[in-house]
Image: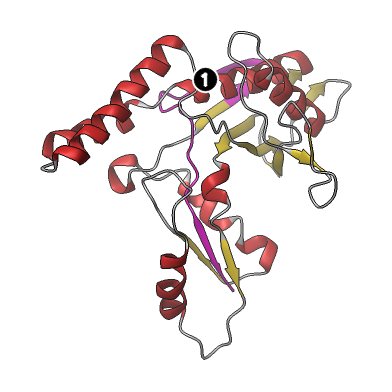
Amino acid sequence: MTTIRQDDFIQSIADALQYISYYHPLDFIQALHAAYEKEQSPAAKDALAQILINSRMCAEGRRPICQDTGIVTVFLKIGMEVRWDAKLSVSEMVNAGVRQAYLHPDNVLRASILSDPAGKRINTKDNTPAVIHMEVVAGDKVEVEVAAKGGGSEAKSKFVMLNPADSIVDWVMKTVPTLGAGWCPPGILGIGIGGTAEKLCLWPSRLAWNLSIFRICLPVVRIMRWKNCVWSCTKKSMRWALVPKVWVV
């Protein structure tokens, strides 16, 4: 039976969030450089160069890639054979890791979460609570996928209930031009169709995490795995910029 200690789990969440705030993955940099080499427009080429320079400065200085350091979203797969050596709940441990990461004295990240969003709208000051999705699975591991979802593109999400005779294509074609600016390129649409409303909204984001940057220029989030109290991460670790989502039921 695998035992996961509270302090290890919290520290790993915090380390992941700090890491993805200032590192792009190698495939993202390679894809962006390839685009720079092929670009014909001087203005566009200069813009790509600025992104590459910014990425290098952030990696070397360990400073956020973007001033919008995201809404923390976490997907957890918890093995049924895992034992927790902890006094806090899993959600409380995740939020403790978020708090530790966003208040790190060497690289303070912007807090964007509000309490009472429809009322006084007071900033929680530490970017908690995170959006947490948990699933119990077979095995003796805990798998954690962490994203810092950009608020600008998150705000572009659209959701609609269509009649059976309505055209999904027509609705998408009508909706996309209304999104306007306010979110960071590249702009990728994740379109979910079917299911209940709450299930539908998970599909595009969840599936997009495993797509290659060379296919759609979308970053891949950091994945951490715990087994026997030892954790490691994949090489494709990065800050994930959320793309606009279009929901269709």
Q: Amino acid at mark 1?
A: Tyr
- The crowding category of the residue bearing disc 1, from other C-alpha atoms within 10 Å (few below 14, some 14 to 19, many at least 20), is many
Magenta-drawn stretch contains 233:
yes
Q: Position of residue 68 (x, y in %)?
A: 55, 33
Residue visible at 21% across and 30% down?
33
Q: Which residue is mark 1?
A: 19
Magenta-drawn stretch contains 188:
no
Q: Position of residue 92 (x, y in %)?
A: 81, 29
User: Where, quadrant-wise, is the C terminus in this rendering?
Assistant: bottom right
The span picked out in magenta is: 225-249
Q: Position of residue 118 (x, y in %)?
A: 81, 52
Q: Measured along the vertical axis of the image, is residue 39 above or below residue 23?
A: below
User: Where, quadrant-wise, is the N terminus in this rendering?
Assistant: top right
Residue situated furthest right in the rendering: 87
Q: Measured along the vertical axis of the image, is residue 210 above or below residue 100?
A: below
Residue visible at 67% across and 35% down?
112
Q: Is residue 206 visible?
A: no
* Element type where label 1 sits in the image: helix
Of 201 and 141, nearer the camera is 201
Q: Quadrant of residue 137?
A: top right
Task: Give the side of residue 51 with respect to residue 220, left or right.
Answer: left
Task: Give the side of residue 40 with respect to residue 163, left or right.
Answer: left
Q: Is residue 170 visible?
A: yes
Residue visible at 56% across and 64% down?
158
How many numbered circles are shown? 1
Q: Position of residue 41 (x, y in %)?
A: 14, 43
Instruction: Tell me the colour scheme of the image.
Output: secondary structure
Of 67 and 192, nearer the camera is 67
